[in-house]
Amino acid sequence: MKTGNAYLPLHYGKAPSWLFQRMKRLSRELTICIVNEWGPEEMLSKLSDPFWFQALGCTLGFDWHSSGLTTTVCGALKEGVAGIEKDLGLYIAGGKGKASRKTPSQIEAYCDGASLDPQPLVYASRMSAKVDNTALQDGYQLYHHTFLFTNRGSWSVIQQGMNDQNRYARRYHWKSDGISNFVNEPHQAICCNRRGKSLNMVAEESEQSRQTTAEIARELPDKTISELKKIEDLYLPEHHDIKSFNINTKRFEKILLKTYERQPETFEKLLAIEGVGPKTVRALSLLSELVYGAQPSFRDPARFSFSHGGKDGHPFPVDKKTYDFSIDFLQNCINKAHISNQDKKEAFKKLSNFRVTS
């Protein structure tokens, strides 16, 4: 299931070397502690929780209220466990920018040494990214993708997109438990400060639209292009950002030819086809609504604020029980970690700044 999102302001630059080295060391020891006590599956569960992830970032010493927390914490975790992945039974692939495109090859390399079939994991990596970039069009373009998995084949995804217009980033968390498909309400929790209009093709209420778009994709391209041209002069619903003149008809026809040849039985199979991107999905959803009456959802799936809620109760009240549990859990791990007393003192100090007193 998809376990949550977090929205954070965009901050540029990078962590200073001295801080990142400390983050690597501490993240390594905390990971070892958690895996030794509860196993690698528990580490995945913790990292897939956006609340706990924020608390971890604060503990490691990074600014908890910025987009850089995601990329830096994931980088520290990946480098921190480098060389001991097999001992831990926990593997971390991907990263920011160009590193994210190496995720499939890194998964395959790890699986070769762990005697795991890489194909289901590579598919999960690609589909989680495709869903958050294409099926859920919320204005945040992915630029970071980290894929974590265990020697049992369980997996988790931490990825982030940016919105240059509102200067915020949105973080998405995924976990393999409970996933039957990738396109029907994969979210367990979404944390954000900002909500807006989104084409949400993974909402439960988009089921009819998903079925219809897959049906349209199986039809002859000429028929679909003809229907699209008919609506050029129509008054489009306000919630549709796309207009027919925004569509590159020749490219759209090439994609439709590919989908016609593949005959995708479901929306998930349609989404998995290479070349089917945001504009294709939006155009098909437009046809689905205007020609066949199957309206997609435009509900932003965000439900919670970043971290454990806003201190002033906006946009959502603080969940103190979850909040305190995350902090207490990390305090216990810091106590058990094999690090210097000075590092423990600094970690406790950072974590104490994260606690809500009211």
Image (cartoon, grey):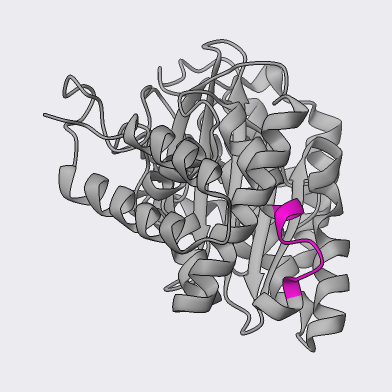
Front-lying residue, 252 or 187: 187
Q: Residue furthest bottom?
A: 115
Q: Residue furthest left?
A: 358
Q: Residue 178, located in which quarter of the rendered image?
A: bottom left
Residue depicted at 45% across the width and 29% down the height: 7
Q: Quadrant of the C terminus?
A: top left
Q: Residue 75, located in which quarter of the rendered image?
A: top right
Q: Quadrant of the N terminus?
A: bottom left
In this view, 190 is above or below 40: above
Indicate left or right for 21 with 184 as reference.
right
Front-lying residue, 207 or 162: 162
Residue 263 visible somewhere in the drawing? no
In this view, 90 is above or below 283: below
Front-lying residue, 8 or 127: 8
Horizontal and vertical percent position of residue 143 = 71, 34
Indicate left or right for 353 with 214 as reference.
left
Q: Residue furthest front?
A: 341
Horizontal and vertical percent position of residue 16 = 73, 24
Indicate left or right for 301 with 146 as reference.
left
Residue depicted at 69% across the width and 19% down the height: 246
Front-lying residue, 242 or 175: 175
Residue depicted at 16% across the width and 32% down the height: 317
Count the numbered circles shown.
0
Residue 60 magenta-highlighted: no
Indicate left or right for 199 with 25 as reference.
left
Residue 10 visible somewhere in the drawing? yes
Extent of the magenta region: 78-85
In this view, 80 is above or below 318: below
Horizontal and vertical percent position of residue 153 = 63, 80
